[in-house]
Amino acid sequence: MAVRTEEAGMRFWWVACAALLCLTGCNRKEVEQEIGYKGKARVNPWLAAERFIEKSGSEIKAVISWTEPTYDESVWMMPAGVLDNDRFVSSMEDWAEDGGHLILMVERATASVSDWSDTQYEIEISNELQSLLERADITLETSGGASAEEIDFLGTIFRVDAASAAVVSSGENDGGVFVSEEFGEGRITVITDSRIFRNRWIDQHDHAALLAALIDAGGGATGTVGIMRGAELSFWKLLAEHLSPLLIGLLVWLVIWLWQNMSRFGPVEQESAVAASRGYDHHLEAIGHFHWKLDHAAALIAPLREHVLDAGQRVLSHSGSGAGERFQFLAERTGLPLERVARALSDEIPPDANSLALVTADLQQLQQSLQVTSKP
């Protein structure tokens, strides 16, 4: 009986816990919180606009930084801050006059701006771009502020949600967030609040419809639409663009260094046999070096001197000349100066290699002269 009572109590507590969980679950509330984009959308704020234009049948040319326009491109969307020098402005002006549609986005127009940040960025417009806008009868001011809920473009009203610190105006309308004027055979459009075409807002109101109308006004169906992100220059971007050549250069240098300093396996060059004359020359050179270090080659000169003196004595005895006239006789026979004959036949040790060579040459010449003279 006690066991059944305990089981009934456990069942009661299980039922009570289940009921409590059901009541708690009924009060649960789901909250959606935006955490930003992932993948390509994090670095490309115009990704949704690019895909929308592609589905409309136009070809897209998406670039990060300045790219020279070509005449097969009908529309160019870009941040106004990109046109910061005379060459860029002149290229875009010529292209627009020949029929291109230039869409300039002023505020929040670069890829580095976060769609979830309320930070106010300073608007910078170059003097060259201001001059171009003046020639197109457009006035752009970076202060004053303007907002709009509707935009009238070529007689069509588009609902928008746009607000900017900059103000743009032309001769036909007051200051606002949007102006589009014909320029030569083309058109120049200025949008101060470019958020309406960014990933987070393009699907709201009539933002996508306005973009499609701008593309059609520039003949986008028959030409390429260019979109420039206008990413700022940074160290990490430069490193990403130029790291590969740097690593390749370091790798080549490392391979060369290892090849020069590490042990090599196998012959580097084809083995060639040493000529016999080369070994003989080295042998003579080694003998001469040994004798020069020993006694300045006196042991080599002495036999040659004795041979010359003996041959000279025999020639003198046959000629009937006295021993005192030996040096003079030899000098006349060889044509050598008397001083060189006396030095060659003296017991003096040559002080250097040059003197040794000269004494040896003189002794050889004396020997040859005496051998010719002593022939029958």
Image (cartoon, rainbow, N blue to C red):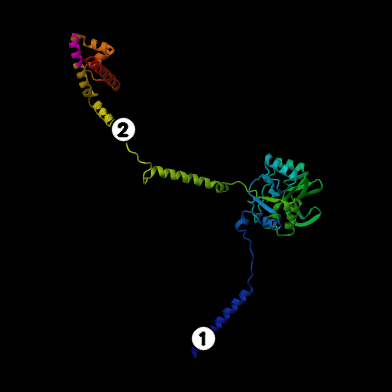
* Circle 2: residue type: Arg
Main SS of the magenta part reads helix
336 vs 142: above or below:
above
Q: Foreground residue, 242 or 127?
A: 242
Return the residue at label 2.
278
Where residue 198 sits: x, y (%)? 68, 55
Residue 259, picture quadrant? top left
Q: Magenta part of the protein: which range?
A: 311-320
Where residue 302 sits: x, y (%)? 21, 21
| Residue 7, numbered label | 1
Q: Foreground residue, 214 or 372?
A: 372
Tally of marks: 2
Q: Is residue 312 magenta?
A: yes
The C terminus: image quadrant: top left
Count neighbours of disc 1 (C-alpha within 10 A) and say few if under 14, some if 14 to 19, many if 20 or more.
Answer: few
Where residue 75 sits: x, y (%)? 72, 49
**Is 209 on the left-hand or right-hand side of 279?**
right
Give the SS element for disc 2: helix
Real-space Cα separation, disc 2 to disc 1, in angstroms: 113 Å
